[in-house]
């Protein structure tokens, strides 16, 4: 059994910052990819940022220069530092991991956390 527990969302004014955390526990073997997705009301879930096991990162254009994804492999924890937040960043944010158990990849999702940015 694997659990991803998210924390750190909330309400912030435009221009403010939030830091999301995602802690994985249970039968974790070797996390390959960690990522953050978000889903705004009435929109499809979109990939925001990814970080590979070696530390390489990717971001969607709309968050480049404002968001930073990171991970602590020893703690099986991922983070999303969000600065200069804009109202259009308002969404439910989900963490995701792809874990390699030696024979196949397994995908897991966090429970989601609301981020609301007021103008």
Image (cartoon, rainbow, N blue to C red):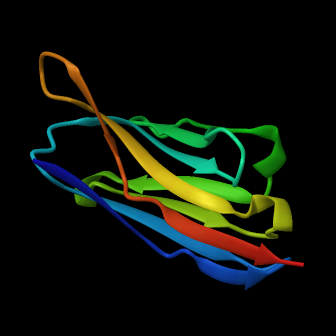
Position in image of residue 47 (x %, y %): 61, 38
Please give left or right for residue 14 compared with residue 52 in the image: right
Q: Taking the image as drawn, is residue 86 in sight? A: no
Please give left or right for residue 78 compared with residue 48 in the image: left
Q: Nearer the viewer, residue 82 or 13?
A: 13
Query: Seen from this angle, which residue lies furthest front?
Result: 42
Query: Seen from this angle, which residue lies furthest right?
Result: 119
Residue at point 83% right, 59% down?
88
On screen, residue 96 above or below 106: below
On screen, residue 5 above or below 71: below
Q: Nearer the viewer, residue 56 or 44?
A: 44
Q: Place residue 15 in its image quadrant.
A: bottom right
Please give left or right for residue 47 compared with residue 99 in the image: right
Q: How many marks can you see?
A: 0
Q: Place residue 16 in its image quadrant.
A: bottom right
Residue at point 66% right, 60% down?
91
Q: Taking the image as drawn, is residue 119 in sight? A: yes
Position in image of residue 108 (x %, y %): 30, 41
Please give left or right for residue 83 compared with residue 30 in the image: right
| Quarter of the picture holding the C terminus | bottom right
């Amino acid at each position: 059994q694997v659990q991803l527990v998210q924390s750190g969302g909330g309400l912030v004014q435009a221009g403010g910052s939030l830091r999301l955390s995602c802690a994985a526990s249970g039968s974790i073997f070797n996390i390959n990819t960690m990522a953050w997705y978000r889903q705004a009301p009435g929109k499809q879930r979109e990939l925001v940022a990814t970080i590979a096991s070696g530390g390489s990162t990717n971001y969607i254009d709309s968050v480049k220069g404002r968001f930073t994804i990171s991970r602590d492999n020893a703690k099986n924890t991922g983070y999303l530092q969000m600065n200069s937040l804009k109202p259009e960043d308002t969404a439910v944010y989900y963490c995701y991991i792809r874990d390699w158990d030696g024979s196949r990849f397994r995908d897991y999702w966090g429970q989601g956390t609301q981020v609301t940015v007021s103008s």
